[in-house]
Image (cartoon, rainbow, N blue to C red):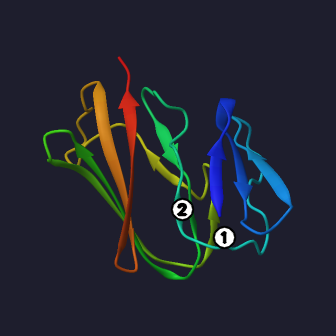
Amino acid sequence: MRVEMGSRGEYRFRAEGSVSLFRVRLTGRDLPMEIEGFVPGETVLLQNYPNPFNPETWIPFGLSEDGRVVLEIWDLGGRLVRRFDLGKLRAGLYLSRERAVRWDGRNELGERVSSGVYIYVLKVNGKAFQRKMVVAE
């Protein structure tokens, strides 16, 4: 499966060998964003939204199989900033604010992090996926 990000939080999922295409648009409204029963063909970590952000963002992802999920946020100096142990999650999409990881821009001690680039890493079933995000002033 290929995931493309459009403007304003729009994601397009394209399955190889398939002609079907559907879109999920993340908005600021409290709308259900999950597609009941949809399990992606592969685990995917999507771009956080909004990006850049201040003071908070959410990090969407999709799981192709059930598994124990951890999301870590690292600074560019290689220091762990924040760790979210999500426990065992079922396969499916975690796109909405209610289901995705929400980060308030604070470290493990509750202090606001400085502006700059951070790396977020999704760990599930022995695999790791990473992306960059920007905390703005």
Q: Would residue 77 be visible to someone looking at this image?
A: yes
In x, y percent, where is residue 44? 54, 62
In x, y percent, where is residue 66? 54, 82
In x, y percent, where is residue 46? 54, 51
Q: Would residue 96 be visible to someone looking at this image?
A: no
Which residue matches tag 1? 40
Horizontal side of residue 119 vs 49, given as left or right: left
Q: Are marks 1 and 2 in contact (CB under 8 Å)?
A: yes
* Above or below: residue 52 compared with residue 85: above
Around disc 1, counting alpha carbons within 10 Å, would you say few (fewer than 14), some (14 to 19), or many (20 or more)? some
Around disc 2, counting alpha carbons within 10 Å, would you say few (fewer than 14), some (14 to 19), or many (20 or more)? many
Residue name at image x 79 percent, y 49 percent: 23
* Above or below: residue 13 compared with residue 116: below
Q: CA distance from mark 1 to mark 2?
A: 8 Å
Q: Residue furthest front?
A: 17
Which residue matches tag 2? 44
Mark 2 residue element: strand
Horizontal side of residue 49 vs 116, given as left or right: right
Quadrant location, the N terminus: bottom right
**Residue 128 quadrant:** bottom left
Identity of the amino acid at label 2? Val
Disc sitting over residue 110 in the figure: none
Mark 1 residue element: loop
